[in-house]
Image (cartoon, rainbow, N blue to C red):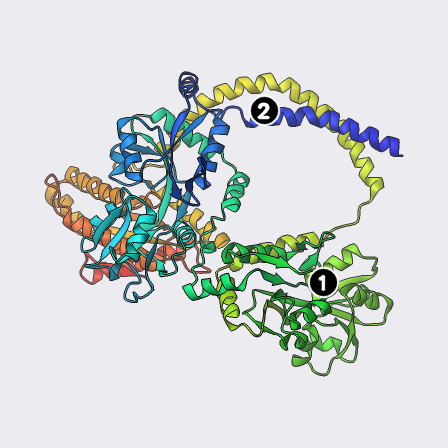
């Protein structure tokens, strides 16, 4: 049997290896580049000159002469896909880099925002990252929370940053003070040269930490959506072919590749956790945070053989550590009882996944629950399903000793007869043998024990209307640590926690392997792979010819697709494209809780313009308004012509307040930007932000109702939907 096993494995390896090698080769092959684009790469063999900043962690910085950061890794990935070399240019200021793009001494800039002024000399790819902007002030400053509070005050940021373009356009009352670097603007706050500094939170957090600027504080994100920052890659305006090549490489980046870079640099917006100076000092003085856990409660929490943490708790602790930015040390224990004892003896500071059981209350305080799970009932498989807890009356019900299950159940149903068992497996064994009628615990722990143990004739028979709530248990003599961990845990997206739990719940359903069937499947698989490999080799030549033709066809198809999704008069997205984007934003909201808003716009008295000046002039008015929309909105916003004189703006990552501000910017721009070639006009606006449970039609109805209200109350107004 062993010889047969080795033979089969060798056969499978022989069959699969050529396919894997060939697949790997094709992964680095053409990205459907046109003949012109391939020719450009053959002619331009010199390394691309790409900008590298010195101090903009974690996106783009230089450490001991080595370019590093999120954008650097992203550019290296694109270069790998294209098979090109990159030369990073380090040292100049941001403003000087922009000058080098204009004089031709630099080919590419990374992490750059697409703005109207820059489009005069740069060509941009689609964005590859989106983030926000924050304000930072001295600890003694309490009057500034947003840009609206900055009138007449001094705002500092890096010379050449896009902030300047928008501050001067939309907030002319703010006094702009520029510096050579982000660090310089923060030092300016310390020295009283400016009242506030402005930058991306992850960058600011790095600077505050590295320079130990404990006398500065974060007062919040800038709410105006025009300052939501998108990172694109820019080439010179005349380098159209290079820009197209880079865009195709961006399009070829997989979700797994993107996730790997994001995880490496911890670039989730909600991982930026701003703590007060007192909290930072407390953590520094505290030293490593010592953790005790349940050593054997998979898939929720357990210790591996090497005493490392695994399960749902392990991923939650990783999220905490990313936000705390302090060392966490795991203190191994032999049992849950010993973990509780260690907490009481102050041998550990935190239990990351604990319920408020009576055994823990003596020595721990608790944060708000970060995970709530339904309790379920397991019985023998010959029992009927449990639909009401009254079915458990007068029966022996097993619960695990030391958990809060007993207390949670008895607080609601004090007449139930509960018996304690050592583990979930012991409880299931008692049910199987008839020593207990049922076991109550979480679905995850019961499913895991059923699939990995030797328990037969037991099933999950129903769900109880009782929750097992898991919180962080914090040593009871440190109230400030409790406050810090409460704050940190609330920054973690519940959707992310649910995703972690669901991954581990699926691990709980591990079936035992039937090896006889396994080897039968191997034999069948081997024969199929031999046939597939034969057909694969025969198809390689034809596939190569098809790929060459496909690159040309795709270029033509892309052009046709753009035409099919563009309004021919204004150049904006047409209704088809706008509707598609709306549904994509809705799907992103339902999946990631990423809020978005829409602005419905109607040109006031447009029929009168057509009647008095003719339809040709009416068309010119529509084109003029479209140009205002394009120049005033962000790159990530979608502006579409919805029909006639109606337009729709889809504002990604924008709440109602932000969309209101953008709508007011647009209203003012249309009113004030009179065009000598067109009659003056105004517009009315209806704003609506997506709400849970809504579909696209619901959202559109609310925006339309707000627009109707704006027109009914005098026009040239902005109204927010209820």
Left or right: where 368 falls relative to 90: right
As measured in the structure, the alpha-carbon distance from the residue carrying label 1 to the one carrying label 2 is 48 Å
**Residue 510, above or below 88:** below
- In the image shown, does 193 or 267 lie closer to the viewer? 193
* Of labels 1 and 2, the one closer to you: 1
Left or right: where 576 falls relative to 323: left
**Residue 483, above or below 502:** below
Left or right: where 678 falls relative to 691: left
Q: Earlier in the sequence, mark 1 or mark 2?
A: 2
State the image quarter where residue 143 is shown. Answer: bottom left
Q: Residue at x 74, y 63 (%)?
A: 460
Q: Secondary structure at mark 1?
A: loop
CA neighbours of label 1 inside 10 A, class few (<14), some (14 to 19), many (20+) = some
Residue 174: percent from the left, percent from the top? 21, 55
Pointer 1 residue = 333
Q: Quadrant of the C terminus?
A: bottom left
Residue 243: percent from the left, percent from the top? 37, 29
Residue 428 visible (yes or no): yes
Q: Are marks 1 and 2 in contact (CB under 8 Å)?
A: no
Q: Residue at x 41, y 40 (%)?
A: 60
Residue 503: percent from the left, percent from the top? 63, 52
Pointer 2 residue = 25
């Amino acid at each position: 049997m062993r010889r047969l096993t080795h033979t089969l494995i060798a056969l499978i390896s022989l069959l699969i290896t050529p396919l894997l090698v060939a697949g790997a080769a094709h992964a680095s092959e053409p990205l459907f580049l046109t003949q012109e684009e391939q020719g450009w790469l053959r002619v331009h063999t010199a390394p691309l000159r790409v900008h590298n900043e010195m101090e903009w962690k974690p996106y783009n910085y230089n450490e001991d002469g080595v370019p590093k950061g999120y954008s650097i890794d992203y550019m290296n990935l694109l270069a790998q896909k294209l098979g090109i070399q990159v030369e990073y240019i380090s040292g100049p200021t941001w403003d000087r880099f922009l000058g080098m793009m204009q004089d031709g001494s630099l080919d590419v800039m990374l992490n750059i925002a697409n703005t109207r002024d820059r489009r005069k000399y740069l060509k941009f790819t689609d964005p590859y990252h989106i983030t926000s902007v924050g304000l930072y002030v001295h600890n003694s400053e309490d009057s500034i929370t947003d840009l609206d509070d900055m009138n007449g005050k001094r705002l500092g940021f890096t010379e050449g940053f896009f902030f300047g373009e928008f501050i001067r356009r939309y907030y002319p009352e703010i006094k702009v003070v520029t510096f050579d670097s982000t660090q310089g603007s923060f030092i300016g706050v310390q020295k009283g040269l400016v009242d506030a500094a402005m930058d991306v939170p992850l960058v600011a957090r790095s600077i505050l930490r590295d320079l130990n600027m404990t006398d500065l504080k974060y007062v919040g994100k800038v709410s105006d959506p025009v300052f939501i920052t998108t990172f694109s890659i820019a080439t010179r305006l005349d380098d159209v072919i290079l820009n197209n090549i880079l865009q195709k490489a961006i399009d070829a980046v997989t979700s797994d590749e993107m996730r790997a870079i994001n995880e490496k640099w911890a670039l989730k917006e909600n991982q930026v956790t701003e703590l007060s100076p007192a909290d930072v000092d407390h953590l520094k003085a505290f030293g490593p945070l010592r953790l005790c856990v349940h050593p054997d409660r998979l898939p929720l929490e357990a210790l591996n053989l090497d005493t490392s943490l695994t399960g749902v708790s392990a991923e939650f602790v990783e999220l905490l550590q990313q936000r705390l930015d302090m060392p966490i040390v795991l203190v191994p224990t032999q049992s849950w009882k010993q973990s509780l004892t260690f907490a009481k003896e102050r041998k550990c500071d935190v239990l990351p996944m604990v319920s408020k059981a009576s055994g823990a209350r003596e020595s721990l305080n608790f944060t708000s629950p970060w995970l709530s799970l339904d309790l379920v009932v397991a019985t023998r498989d010959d029992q009927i399903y449990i639909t009401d807890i009254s079915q458990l009356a007068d029966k022996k019900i097993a619960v695990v000793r030391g958990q809060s299950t007993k207390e949670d159940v008895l607080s609601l149903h004090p007449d139930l007869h509960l018996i304690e068992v050592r583990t979930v497996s012991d409880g299931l064994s008692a049910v199987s043998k008839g020593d207990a009628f049922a076991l109550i615990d979480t679905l995850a722990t019961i499913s895991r024990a059923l699939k990995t143990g030797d328990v037969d004739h037991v099933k999950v028979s129903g769900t109880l209307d009782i929750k097992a709530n898991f919180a962080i248990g914090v040593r009871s003599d440190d109230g400030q640590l409790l406050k810090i961990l409460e704050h940190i845990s609330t920054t973690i997206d519940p959707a992310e926690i649910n995703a972690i739990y669901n991954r581990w719940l699926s691990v709980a359903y591990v079936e035992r392997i039937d090896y006889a069937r396994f080897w039968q499947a191997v034999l069948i698989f081997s024969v199929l792979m031999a046939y597939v490999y034969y057909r694969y080799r025969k198809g390689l030549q034809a596939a190569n010819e098809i790929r060459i033709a496909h690159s040309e066809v795709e270029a033509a198809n892309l052009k046709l697709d753009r035409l099919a999704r563009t309004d021919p008069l204004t150049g904006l997205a047409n209704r088809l494209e706008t509707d598609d984007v709306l549904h994509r934003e809705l799907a992103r909201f339902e999946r990631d809780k990423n809020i978005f808003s829409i602005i419905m716009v109607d040109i006031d008295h447009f029929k009168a313009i057509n009647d008095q000046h003719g339809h040709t002039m009416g068309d010119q008015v529509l084109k003029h308004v479209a140009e205002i929309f394009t120049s005033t909105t962000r790159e990530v916003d979608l502006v579409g012509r919805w029909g006639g004189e109606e337009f729709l703006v889809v504002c990604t990552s924008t709440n109602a307040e932000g969309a209101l501000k953008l709508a007011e910017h647009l209203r003012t721009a249309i009113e004030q930007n009179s065009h000598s070639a067109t009659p003056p006009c105004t517009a009315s606006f209806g704003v609506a932000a997506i709400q849970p449970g809504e579909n696209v039609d619901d959202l559109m109805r609310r925006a339309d109702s707000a627009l109707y209200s704006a027109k009914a109350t005098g026009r040239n107004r902005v109204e927010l939907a209820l």
